[in-house]
Image (cartoon, grey):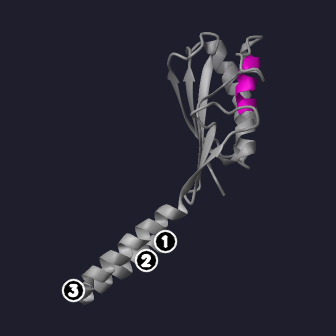
C-alpha cells in the first residue's frame, strides 16, 4: 500500500471511529491533495537547437516518474527532412529522439511506449523501420507500441514518432 492509500485509509478509519472527526479528516485529505499536486510539477526538455516556440520537445512530470515527447521526425540539423534514403530518415528520427532523451537524462532503455504515425504501410518502409528500431530500443523489454497511418506536416516525411518513458 502506498503512502496515499495509507493516508486515506487512516482518515477513513478516523471518520468511522468518531463522526466529529469528519471535518478534520476532510481537511487532511484536502491538504494531502494540495501537497501531492505540489510534488508533481512539469519541466520542459529541449535539446540545444531543438526548441520550437510554444511547444516542448519533451516534458518530465516530476513526482509521477513520466517523460513524454512531442512528435519527432527524421530531420537534419537545419530542420529539413532527410531524404537521401528511407533508412537515413528513420535513423535521423531515432537520433532526434535520442537527443531529447539525453537532454532529459534518459536513454532508450527507459522507453515504455512508442507511438508512430506513418505515411503508409509500405512493406519496404516497415521492414526498414523495424530494422532501425531494433538498433535503438531495448530488445530485452521492448516498449509497447502502436503504428497509425496518417498525414504528416511535410510530404517528404515518412514517419513521426512520440514516446513515453519512465523516469527512474
Magenta stretch encompasses residue 94? yes
Tell me which segment is drawn in magenta: 87-96
> Residue 56's spot in the image, x, y percent?
61, 38
Name the residue nearer the viewer: 162 or 123.
162
Q: In this view, does 100 lie to the left or right of 67?
A: right
Q: Quarter holding the C terminus?
A: bottom right
Give the Cα distance between marks 1 and 3: 26 Å
Crowdedness near tag 1: few (<14), some (14–19) or many (≥20) residues, C-alpha within 10 Å: few
Q: Residue furthest left?
A: 19
User: Which mark is in front, 1 or 3?
Assistant: 3
> Residue 111's spot in the image, x, y percent?
64, 44
Q: Is residue 69 left or right of residue 136?
A: left
User: Which mark is in front, 2 or 3?
Assistant: 3
- The quarter holding residue 50 reads top right
Q: Which residue is drawn at 63% across and 36% down?
A: 57
Q: Residue at x 71, y 42 (%)?
A: 101
Give the residue number, with chain letter if any, for mark 2.
6
Q: Residue furthest front?
A: 53
Is residue 1 in view? Answer: no
Answer yes or no: do the residues labelled 2 and 1 have beta carbons within 8 Å? yes
Answer yes or no: do the residues labelled 2 and 3 have beta carbons within 8 Å? no
- The quarter holding residue 89 reads top right
The image's mark for residue 19 is: 3
Compared to residue 135, the image places residue 153 above or below, namely: above
Give the Cα distance between marks 2 and 3: 20 Å
Compared to residue 159, the image places residue 15 above or below, namely: below
Give the residue number, with chain letter if any, for mark 1.
2
The image's mark for residue 95 is: none
Amino acid at each position: 500500500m502506498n503512502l496515499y492509500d495509507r493516508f486515506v485509509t487512516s482518515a477513513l478509519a478516523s471518520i468511522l471511529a468518531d463522526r466529529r472527526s469528519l471535518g478534520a479528516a476532510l481537511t487532511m485529505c484536502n491538504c494531502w491533495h494540495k501537497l501531492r499536486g505540489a510534488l508533481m510539477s512539469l519541466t520542459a526538455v529541449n535539446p540545444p537547437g531543438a526548441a520550437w516556440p510554444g511547444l516542448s520537445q519533451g516534458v518530465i512530470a516530476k513526482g509521477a516518474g513520466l517523460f513524454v515527447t512531442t512528435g519527432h521526425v527524421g530531420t537534419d540539423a537545419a530542420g529539413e527532412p532527410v531524404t537521401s534514403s528511407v533508412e537515413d530518415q528513420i535513423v535521423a528520427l531515432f537520433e532526434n529522439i535520442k537527443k531529447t532523451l539525453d537532454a532529459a537524462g534518459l536513454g532508450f532503455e527507459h522507453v515504455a511506449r512508442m507511438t508512430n504515425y506513418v505515411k503508409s504501410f509500405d512493406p519496404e518502409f516497415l521492414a526498414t523501420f523495424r530494422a532501425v528500431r531494433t538498433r535503438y530500443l531495448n530488445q530485452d523489454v521492448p516498449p509497447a507500441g502502436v503504428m497509425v497511418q496518417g498525414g504528416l506536416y511535410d510530404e517528404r516525411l515518412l514517419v513521426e514518432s512520440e514516446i513515453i518513458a519512465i523516469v527512474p
